[in-house]
């Protein structure tokens, strides 16, 4: 299993640079309060993004245009929370173990006890794994709409259990995940305004990693967000 980072830092996959990010200028489209975030991830070299990185605006420009297609979508079309590496832990547990700021104890059948997590959507510390959801950065329904309707069942399973990229799956409070549901950034952003730049980069990198499209409304919302995040950069590795 690929190792994942706990919070956004510069890595080979889906790395985000947030120095100088000003997410407060973004239009969130809701009245949710902001929350204090931790220190931003280190930026690339002065004067431009790190080697191999794209500015958020340029990365958004690489997402192919498309028209959403919801017909035929069923959540069960994406087999998820499987144990792909046969180590006894399904995908949900793998994410919880790797994103914990204090590691939980692992019992029989990968039962987890203890542990501490930081939900970056709302900057809430969680000490009970049952209060966390594992969010698909680009929700399954949105993935279907933007290209996964034409995938094989095997590729949809790979998408739903993507442990090969740091931010394809994230552990967040259940209330924020359920508030997000299947919305794209045109209609939902994290309640912590200081998370917006990270979220925009994670969303964009996931779409690029899996070759998913964006419609005009989604693209406009992402570009507006990029205007408030001039120093945010994105790196991604295409999924196999």
Image (tube, rainbow, N blue to C red):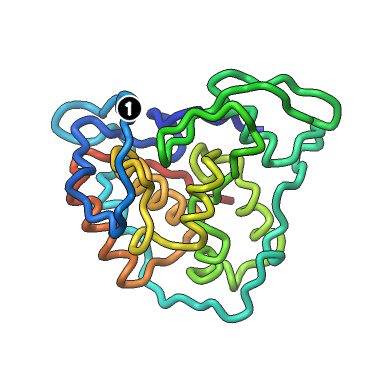
Element class at badge 1 = loop
Give how far across and how far down residue 128 sits, in percent: 63, 30
In the shown orientation, is residue 118 left or right of residue 26?
right
Give how far across and how far down residue 170 sits, in percent: 53, 41
In the shown orientation, is residue 175 left or right of residue 89?
left
The residue depicted at 36 percent of the width and 58 percent of the height is 185
Give how far across and how far down residue 104 sits, in percent: 67, 21
Residue 183, quarter of the rendered image: bottom left
Residue 33, placed above or below residue 153? above
Quarter of the rendering occupied by the N terminus: top right
Residue 59, placed above or below residue 99? below
- Seen as rendered, the residue at the extreme bottom is 71
The residue depicted at 40 percent of the width and 74 percent of the height is 66
Dot 1: within a 10 Å radius of its alpha carbon, few (fewer than 14), some, or many (20 or more) residues? some
The residue at which mark 1 appears reads as 41
Give how far across and how far down residue 233 sits, in percent: 29, 40
In the shown orientation, is residue 66 left or right of residue 165?
left
- Seen as rendered, the residue at the extreme left is 47
The residue depicted at 17 percent of the width and 47 percent of the height is 25
Residue 94, placed above or below residue 58? above
In the shown orientation, is residue 147 left or right of residue 85?
left
Total number of numbered discs in the rendering: 1
- Seen as rendered, the residue at the extreme right is 108
Residue 78, quarter of the rendered image: bottom right
Which of 220/124 is in front?
124
């Amino acid at each position: 299993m690929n190792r994942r980072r706990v919070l956004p830092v510069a890595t080979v996959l889906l790395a985000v640079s947030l120095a100088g990010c000003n997410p407060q200028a973004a239009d969130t489209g809701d009245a949710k309060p902001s929350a204090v975030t931790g220190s931003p991830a280190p930026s690339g070299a002065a004067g431009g993004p790190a080697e191999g990185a794209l500015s958020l605006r340029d990365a958004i420009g690489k997402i192919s245009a498309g028209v959403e297609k919801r017909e035929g979508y069923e959540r069960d079309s994406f087999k998820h929370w499987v144990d792909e590496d046969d180590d006894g832990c399904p995908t949900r547990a793998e994410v919880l173990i790797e994103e914990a700021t204090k590691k939980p104890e692992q019992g029989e059948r990968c039962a987890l006890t203890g542990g501490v997590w930081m939900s970056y959507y709302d900057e809430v510390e969680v000490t009970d794994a049952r209060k966390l959801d594992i969010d698909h950065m680009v929700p399954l329904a949105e993935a279907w709409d933007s290209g996964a309707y034409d995938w094989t069942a095997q590729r949809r399973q790979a998408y739903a259990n993507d442990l090969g990229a740091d931010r394809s799956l994230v552990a967040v409070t259940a209330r924020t995940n359920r508030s997000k549901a299947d919305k794209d950034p045109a209609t939902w952003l994290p309640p912590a305004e200081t998370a917006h730049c990270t979220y925009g980069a994670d969303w964009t990198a996931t779409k690029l990693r899996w070759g998913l499209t964006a419609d005009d409304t989604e693209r406009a919302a992402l570009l507006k967000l990029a205007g408030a995040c001039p120093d945010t950069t994105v790196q991604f590795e295409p999924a196999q």
